[in-house]
């Protein structure tokens, strides 16, 4: 079910388990913004550090793209740290990848040091572009 349909049907709202957005491009940013504007909690994970110059947000003029600058700002300021309770409407996981999806609705994220974080999610949007790592899918996608 697409994000917009899940939100408009009432399947997702502020009381729902968070939506997981995977990716660091503009489509992923659009999904983060859509969830954020409708007060739907979101987890956002991506493989690169926020400061990576190749990250599209670091290449866009702030004045021309304020909405994407807002996502970049959230990516910088609302980062999950190991051991913390996840309480923000949006929580960002830089330098993480999806290790697995479990049948119980949980997603396992793994950081570059191998530390895993298990999150309960309502749905996942995999928006990962041209060079995806699909190891988390059965038979690697």
Image: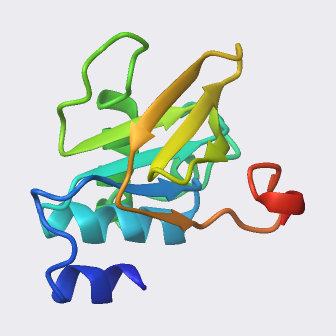
For residue 9, which quarter of the picture? bottom left
Q: Residue furthest front?
A: 104
Looking at the image, which residue is at 14% across and 81% down?
A: 10
The quadrant in which the N terminus is found is: bottom left
Looking at the image, which residue is at 66% across and 44% down?
A: 100
For residue 130, which quarter of the picture? bottom right
The quadrant in which the C terminus is found is: bottom right
Left or right of 68? Residue 70 is: left
User: Closer to the camera, 120 or 132?
Assistant: 120
From the viewer's perspective, is residue 114 above or below residue 19? above
Looking at the image, which residue is at 54% across and 54% down?
A: 103
Residue 123 in the image: state x and y as whole percent: 41, 64
From the viewer's perspective, is residue 115 above or below residue 79? above
Does residue 95 appear anywhere in the picture? no
Left or right of 78? Residue 124 is: right
Residue 73 in the image: state x and y as whole percent: 33, 41
Looking at the image, which residue is at 38% across and 60% down?
A: 68
Does residue 124 appear anywhere in the picture? yes
User: Closer to the camera, 49 or 81?
Assistant: 81
Residue 119 in the image: state x and y as whole percent: 41, 38
From the viewer's perspective, is residue 85 above or below residue 25? above
């Amino acid at each position: 079910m697409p994000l917009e349909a899940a939100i408009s049907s009432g399947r997702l709202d502020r009381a729902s388990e968070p939506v997981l957005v995977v990716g660091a491009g503009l489509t992923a940013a659009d999904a983060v913004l859509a969830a954020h504007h409708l007060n739907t909690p979101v987890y956002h994970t991506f493989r690169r550090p926020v400061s990576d110059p190749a990250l599209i947000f670091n290449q866009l003029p702030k004045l021309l793209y304020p909405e994407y600058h807002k996502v970049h700002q959230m990516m910088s300021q609302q980062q999950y740290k190991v051991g913390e309770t996840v309480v923000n409407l949006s929580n960002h996981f830089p330098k993480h990848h999806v290790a697995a999806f479990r049948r119980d609705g949980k997603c396992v994220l793994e950081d570059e040091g191998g530390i895993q974080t298990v999150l309960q999610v309502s749905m996942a949007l995999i928006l990962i572009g041209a060079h995806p790592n699909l190891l988390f899918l059965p038979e690697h996608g």
